[in-house]
Amino acid sequence: MGNKNQEYFSSRWALLISTLGIAVGTGNIWRFSRIVAQNGGGSFLIPWMIFLFIWSIPLIIAEFALGKFTRHGPFGAISITAGKKFGWMGAFVVFVSTAIMFYYSVVTGWCIKFLFSALTGDLLRTKDYLGFWENFSNGYSPILFHFIALSISAYVIYKGVTKGIEKANKILVTTLVAILIILLVRAVTLPGASAGLKYFFTPKLEYLTNYKVWLSALTQNAWDTGAGWGLILTYAIYMRKREDVPLNAALIGMGNNSVSLIAGMIIFSTVFALAGPEAMTKITQSGPANTGLTFIYLPLLFGKMSSSFLVNQIFAVMFFLALSSAALSSLISLVELATRTFIDFGIERRKAILFVASLGFLFGIPSALNLNFFLNQDWVWGVGLILSGAFIAFAIIRFGTDKFRTEIINGEGSDIKIGKIYNFIIQFLIPLQVVILLVWWLVSSAQWDPEWWNPFHAQNAGTCIFQWGVVIGIFVVLNNFLTKRILGASK
C-alpha cells in the first residue's frame, strides 16, 4: 500500500535501535525516578513491569503491524483498518504527538543548554542552582535552544531514513547507553549508594495494596515506552516485509524498561550517597515545570561527587550528554511523524520537513517563554495519549482482532506467533485500562482545582475536554475531505 519510492531501514539492528530511540527519552531519566520515589520505591516496579505486558507491548505490536501492513502514518493506517469514516481518529493521534513535539523541542533545548553549561563549567561554578534555572527559563534563551533542537531534528529528517534517522539514532542511542553504563558504575560505587539501591529495589506490601501506585505504574508505562503515540507505527512504515513484529516489540519494550532501571539506579545511588537524609525530598520534589530533580538538584550533587572540579565536570557533561541524546532521539521521531503525514498527502519530503520545522518552531515559542503554558500543553496532550492508544486498539477491533493477529502480526516475516491472549488484551484489557486512566486523571484533577470545568485553567479536566473537543470536532468535520486526499495520494 506504500509508494514505489519507499525507503527501508537497512537491517533489523537499525530498525530496533531507531525504534528504541523513540521509546527512550527524558521521561526515562527524570520522570521515572521521581514517580518511583513517590510510589514506594521497589513496590512500584512490580505493577510497572506487569503493565509492560498488558499495555505497552501489545500496543507496540499493534503499531509495528499497522505501519508494516498499511505503509501509512497513523491517519492513513486507521482509515485503512477501521474504515474511512474513522480517519479522524488517526488525525487525532497525529495531532497529539505533533502538539507534544511543539513543547518537547523546548525540553530538548533545555537539555542542550545545560550540556553547554556543563562543558563550559558555568553549571558547577554557580552557587544558586534554582536561580541559575530561573534566570535561564524566564528569559529569551529557551527560544534559541528550542530552535537549535528543532533544527538538528529537521536536518536528520531531511536526510531521509537510512542517511538521517538510522544514522542519527545509531550515534544517539549508542552514546546514551554507553554513558549510562559509565555513570552507573560510578554511582553504585559511591559511599552510601547501597541505601539508594535498597530503597529502589525493595517492595513494601502497604504500597502494593494502594490502587494509586498501580495507576501511577500504568501511567508511567503508557507514557515512557512510546506505545500508542503513533511514532512506532511511523517507523514501522520502513520495516522490510520479512521483519518480525512480536519479537521486535518485546525487545523495544524490555529495552526501554532496562534503560529506565539503569537511570533509576544511577539517580537513587547518587542522591542517597550525596544528599543523606534529604535524599527522598530531593527525588520526589518536582520543582518548576517538573524539572527540579534534573535541572536543579542533580547539578548540585554533581559538584559533590569528588574533590576535583574536573572530575565533577566530566560526570555532569556525561549526564547531560546522555539526557540530550535521549531527548533528541525522541524529538526526531516526533518530527518524522508529522513529516510523514504530509508525505502521505503527496507532499515531497523536503517541502514537508520545511513546513513542519517552521510550524514546530512557531508553535513551540509560547512553551519556551511561559512555563504555565508549557505545563498546560504537557497536561492536555500527555493525558491525550491515552485516547491515542484507545483509537489504535479500536482500529484493530474494527478490522477484526483475530484476523489482524493471524494475517498481519503472524503473517510474513513472523518468527514468533502470538496466541489468542492477544485478542483478549486488545478487546478487553486495553479499553478497560483506558477508561480507568482517563477517569482517574480527570476526576483527580478536581481535587486540586475546584473549578475543574474551567477550560482556561492550566491543569484540570475542563482544559483537556475543551481542547480535545475542538481538535476532534475539526477533524470530524474535515474527515471525508482529508481521508480522500490521503488515500488518494497513495494510489
Image (cartoon, rainbow, N blue to C red):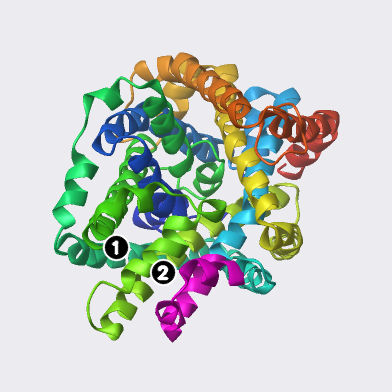
Instruction: Find residue 232 and report its horizontal and vertical position in percent.
Output: 50, 44
Taking depth in this image into account, of 283 and 55 the one nearest to the observer is 283
Q: Residue at x 37, y 68 (%)?
A: 300
Cβ atoms at labels 1 and 2 below 8 Å apart = no
Q: Nearer the viewer's eye, disc 1 or disc 2?
A: 2
The image quadrant where one finds the C terminus is top right
Judge from the rendering whether residue 185 lies leftward or rightward of residue 58; answer left or right.
left
Asked if the magenta segment contains residue 423, the reply would be no
User: Position of 33 compared to 219: left or right?
Assistant: left
Per the rendered image, the range of residues in magenta is 110-136
What secondary structure is the magenta-colored segment mainly? helix
Q: Amino acid at mark 2?
A: Phe
Task: Count residues near mark 2 (Cα–Cα under 10 Å), then give few for <14, some for 14-19, many for 20+.
Answer: many
Residue type, label 1: Leu
Does 122 appear in magenta? yes
Query: To which quarter of the image does residue 38 belong?
Result: top left
The residue shown at (57%, 41%) is: 230
Label 1 and label 2: CA atoms lie apart by 11 Å
Which residue is denoted by mark 2 in the rendering? 320
The residue positioned 60% from the left and 71% from the top of the image is 136
Residue 369 is at least partly visible in this image: yes
Label 1 vs 2, first from the N-terminus: 1
Structural crowding at the residue carrying mark 1, measured as other residues with C-alpha within 10 Å and reported as few (<14), some (14–19) or many (≥20): many
Left or right: 211 as drawn, with respect to 394 = left
Residue 455 occupies which quadrant of the picture? Answer: top right
Q: Kindly state the secondary structure of the residue where label 2 is placed.
A: helix
User: Would you name the residue on which mark 1 appears?
Assistant: 180
